[in-house]
Image (tube, rainbow, N blue to C red):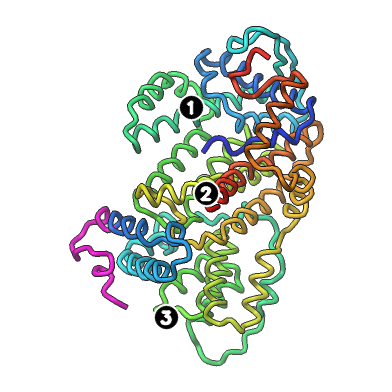
Amino acid sequence: MFGYLTADILAFNSQQRRFYRSFYCGLCEKLAQRHRPLARLTLSYDFTFIGMLLCDVYQQEVTLNKKHCPIHPLTKIEVRYSPCFDFVSDMNLLMNYYQYLDDFHDDHNLLAGKKAQQWEAEIVKIQQQYPQKCQVIQKKMTLLAQYENDNVLIPDLPANCFGEIMAELCYEKQDEHSEVLKKFGFHLGRYIYLLDAVLDLKKDLKKGHYNPLITMDSSNFQTMLTLVLEEANFYYKELKLDKFCDLLDNIVYTGLWSKYDQQKILERKSLK
Amino acid sequence: MRDPYEVLGVSRNASEQEITKAYRKLAKKYHPDLNPNNPEAAEKMKEVNSAYDAIRNGTANQYQNSNNSYHQNTSYSSYYGPFGSFYDFAGFNQRNSQAYTDFDVVEHYINAQEFQQALHVLYGMEVKTAKWYYYCAICNYYLGNQLTAMEQIDQAIALEPNNLQYQQVKQQMMNQRNSYRDTSKRYRRSYRSNSSSFFSRILLYFLCLLCTGNRCFFPIFCCL
């Protein structure tokens, strides 16, 4: 489920690109600080988006450092983060852990199993810090697995389930912004889940894997995805973003479609 | 309709796993996405879907039946903003019917905004007419099952294509909100050039980076 909340970087000017990259590096730094340096490997742009979103909504102060990066040793890089990145890095690790467990159980991927094992101590710490949140996420992940096991072909059910997981990831605690963040996260989660199902449909059909969209008419997919984003947008507008509005707008209005567009282009090429 | 077990090619004692496996095997063979422009495959797929649905009716309904534990307290309507007024337009506020029918009960629940209850009555009904799909669509829409709602309103329209009310409700569902489409069009138009393909854009991206000396997002160019 990772890799969909990214920006259309070609649409950024150089300053925006620098900012976007610096937040990505900021999350990387936080992962290493709060957990272990190895946590850097779980880094993704998806959680960078959530970090920037929360930073903007709560108008947090951004810390800027210029430092050497272990993976890019020659030049100093800009590293930006804000207080909410602590929470975001925890959620990043948590979701990666669940992904590893999923891969281990579904595909019997032993490497994923090993990876999950090595993070267990950190996950326990995170679960102690956010007990209710982690309980909800765990419950919904179990429900998702159940839907998959029972071959539920009503797409709303698993989509709503994943939406609730995403909703939990988009707010830290109850406050004046959390309700709107939760609702935005819910619809975003629905979109991500459905987009993943749309893009994997042919592959899942060929491999006999679970896909909730098997009985749907694929000519409706783009409309379906757009309507989900309409709901998400209703709450996105309520968040009244300010400092990073342009970066986040790019992701929401263009970047979210990147993988979909790419697949369409490849399909058109293969038909020629 | 043919015997559903025969359509799927499974015995009456087959386990759920076996039925699912058989269904997926047939889906791989006949799905329209893997057989484009093949109306026979599309027809066959419909038959397979109906057969699977029929066999699973006992278990498939558990996900739709509001008494089932999966569905208790799972109305997602709290995640949706204020709904438009098609609920009034749909004429539910006028109850002229003299005869007591199941649809009267459904309308009563819809009027009282008890959509879960209305669905419970609907899913207990045997015959699925256009009106049935229409009421289901409305209930599911308000419960936050928007995809199911869209599918059901489409089915209502397919069964009664001349029914304007169904068409209008579908339009309202589609256009309840359209600010995303408006904003997104502006973005995508200004940043997408008409002739550029995915691969040429990637090439252009690397050229831009080399010229401006910006950091690349791909690790291979970490030293630039």
Q: Secondary structure at mark 3?
A: loop
A236, above or below A22, in the image? below
| Magenta span of residues | B1-19
Q: Residues within 10 Å of mark 1 (few under 14, many from 20)?
A: some
User: Which residue is painted at 48% across and 21% down in the image?
Assistant: A125
Count residues near mark 2 (Cα–Cα under 10 Å), then give few for <14, some for 14-19, many for 20+: few
Kindly identify which chain the residue marked by label 2 belongs to. Answer: A
Question: Could you say where residue A88 lies in the image, as x and y percent from the top left?
Answer: 61, 27
The chain letter under disc 1 is: A
Q: Quick one: A211 or B137, which is closer to the camera?
A: A211
Q: Which residue is mark 1?
A: A127
User: Tag 1: residue type?
Assistant: Gln
Q: CA distance from mark 3 to mark 1?
A: 49 Å
Cβ–Cβ under 8 Å for marks 1 and 2: no
Q: Position of residue A191 (x, y in %)?
A: 58, 48
Front residue of B177 and A165: B177
Which of the labelled discs sits on residue B127, or is there none? 3
Residue B2 is covered by the magenta coloring: yes
**Residue B124, picture quadrant:** bottom left
- Residue at 60% over, 53% down: A225
